[in-house]
Image (cartoon, helix red, strand yellow):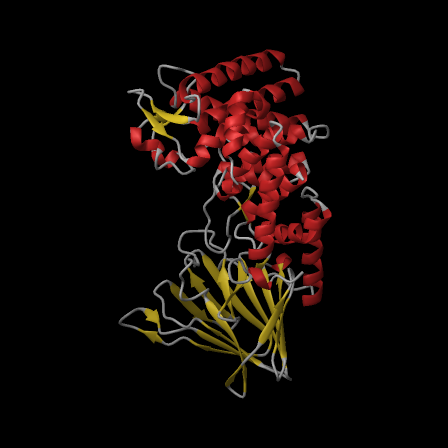
């Protein structure tokens, strides 16, 4: 698979590695995934795309190159020779082999964050939370790191690797200074084959889509696979962009979970982060029930899911209810991950249709899990709460034409932003038909432009508005097929929608 269309925004790498190669202006740069404070983080307007620009040289002069990139191998081509690059996940290393040309890694700009050390074993380059340790198995390394003592930083760090007997074999380890580099046991071809097989195995865990969207599904799978990050707890999450941001939330991981066919794997993402923020885990659990995915799930996994939903509901019940215990509110704007410019015109705290719809589905999911593990008393409790929550939503936030916000203290109404008006559609058939009809009439193809619009489309489909849902999903799929994918989280949503709606 050709990943060059992804190279500028996402790059080439591996799910278990911080190494990323990214393109800028037709040239490749070595970068690090943004996994900690201080690590190089590529912003949208970065002048430099990474730590080192990669150049090919011949007789000391810059030699233009072109490159091809698949999910597991980069091949650089020049008039005088070639370079091949792969990730060696077993050795936490970037492998670079060349023939006929020299290689230059140029930091281009001096930076106070960059520290370097040239040792007998290799060249160490540290920047914040990341460290490259370069070792040459074949080829002579020439490292220029001139220091300005008054400024306490290097002018620029430049590493040249000159061929020995026409060949280069360079290793860039991603290791802390107290770790010895592991033994290299695989060839670059073996690394590439292993990584391609791993991606294929990962892709097989995702929901199938209609055949006409299979190529797009594979491209989305690559971005999801690349964008993994392991938490200190050992759990894994998928980031919106591993190169540019390390931020994520529990609601984002709920979106990710819906793309997986295996309920155990999906559950790992739903419970990967503390149940803070929007309580969207309930919706994600209900999607698994809709696929009848719980038949081969362990009771341990189900109890873990149940505990997560219970903790989420308990937080909102204890901290975000007023005189009406069945009506929930945002106390502060930052708690809402959706557009809320209009919603907060009535001030804070404000009851919102989206948060109350999420809580209703959370109650439904908790009830189903309780029934699945035969805790009937809990199931009855959750269903009673569900009924009370739904009545409160309609009685307080529906005005006969649309859903609105309401200041908890004053009762003053405020217009809800467009996606928030539609959000109760996620209740599907639980929403009274007359209300659903009015909302469905207004739902446009752009609903997926909003972060949690996927929930609305699923709600339309579940409520019997299948044709509207299909139109929206096909429009979104055609757009990303033409313009490319901007986010693996959005791609995960499209896989889930294409599987269920088309």
The front one of 388 and 139 is 388
Task: Please tell me which residue is depicted at 49% across the width and 62% down the height of the picture.
Answer: 31
Relative height, residue 20 to residue 168 (above, below): above
Asked whether the viewer can see residue 223, the reply is: no
Relative height, residue 168 to residue 361 (above, below): below
Q: On the rendered image, what quadrant is the N terminus found in?
A: bottom right
User: Percent x, y for residue 368?
Assistant: 62, 21
User: Percent x, y for residue 32?
Assistant: 49, 59
Task: Please tell me which residue is depicted at 62% across the width and 12% down the height of the picture.
Answer: 376
Task: Please tell me which residue is depicted at 53% across the width and 12% down the height of the picture.
Answer: 384
Q: Is residue 91 left or right of residue 453?
A: right
Relative height, residue 13 to residue 317 (above, below): below
Q: Is residue 385 left or right of residue 116?
A: right
User: Percent x, y for residue 228?
Assistant: 56, 49
The front one of 124 and 331 is 331
Furthest residue toward bottom: 59
Q: Is residue 296 left or right of residue 407?
A: right
């Amino acid at each position: 698979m050709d990943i060059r269309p992804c190279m500028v925004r996402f790059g080439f790498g591996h799910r278990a590695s911080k190494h990323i190669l990214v393109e800028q202006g037709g040239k490749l740069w070595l970068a690090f995934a943004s996994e900690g404070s201080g690590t190089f983080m590529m912003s949208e307007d970065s002048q430099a795309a990474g730590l080192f620009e990669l150049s090919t040289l011949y007789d000391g002069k810059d030699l233009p190159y072109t490159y091809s990139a698949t999910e597991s191998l980069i091949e650089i081509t020049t008039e005088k020779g070639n370079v091949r690059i792969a990730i060696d996940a077993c050795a936490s290393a970037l492998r670079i082999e060349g023939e006929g040309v020299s290689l230059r890694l140029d930091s281009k700009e001096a930076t106070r964050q960059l520290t370097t050390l040239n040792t007998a074993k290799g060249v160490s380059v540290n920047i914040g939370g990341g460290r490259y340790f370069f070792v040459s198995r074949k080829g002579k390394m020439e490292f220029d790191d001139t220091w300005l003592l008054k400024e306490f930083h290097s002018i620029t760090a430049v590493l040249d690797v000159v061929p020995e007997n026409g060949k280069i074999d360079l290793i860039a380890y991603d290791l802390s200074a107290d770790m010895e580099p592991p033994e290299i046991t695989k060839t670059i071809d073996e690394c590439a084959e292993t990584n391609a097989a791993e991606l294929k195995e990962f892709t097989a865990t995702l929901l199938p889509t209609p055949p006409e969207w299979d190529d797009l599904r594979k491209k989305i799978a690559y971005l999801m696979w690349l964008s993994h990050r392991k938490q200190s707890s050992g759990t894994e999450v998928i980031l919106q962009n591993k190169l540019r941001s390390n931020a994520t939330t529990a609601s984002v991981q709920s979106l990710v979970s819906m793309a997986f066919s295996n309920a155990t794997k999906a559950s790992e993402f739903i419970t990967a982060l503390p149940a803070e923020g929007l309580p969207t885990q309930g919706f994600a659990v209900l999607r698994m029930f809709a696929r009848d995915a719980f038949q081969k799930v362990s009771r341990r996994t189900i109890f873990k899911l149940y505990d997560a939903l219970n903790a989420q509901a308990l937080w909102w019940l204890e901290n975000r209810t007023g005189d009406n215990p069945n009506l929930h509110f945002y106390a502060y704007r930052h708690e809402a991950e959706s557009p809320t410019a209009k919603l907060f015109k009535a001030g804070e705290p404000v009851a919102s249709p989206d948060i109350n719809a999420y809580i209703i589905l959370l109650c439904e999911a908790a009830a189903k899990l309780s029934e699945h593990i035969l805790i009937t008393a809990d199931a009855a409790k959750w269903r009673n709460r569900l009924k009370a929550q739904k009545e409160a939503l309609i009685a307080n936030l529906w005005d006969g034409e649309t859903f609105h916000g309401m200041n908890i203290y004053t009762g003053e109404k405020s217009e809800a932003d467009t996606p928030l008006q539609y959000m109760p559609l996620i209740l599907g058939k639980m929403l009274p038909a007359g209300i659903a009809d009015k909302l469905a009439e207004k739902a446009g193809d752009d609903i997926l432009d909003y972060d949690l619009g996927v929930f609305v489309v699923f709600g339309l489909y579940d409520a019997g508005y299948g044709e509207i849902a299909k139109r929206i999903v096909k429009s979104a799929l055609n757009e990303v097929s033409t313009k490319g994918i901007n986010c693996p989280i959005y791609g995960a949503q499209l896989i889930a929608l294409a599987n269920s709606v088309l």
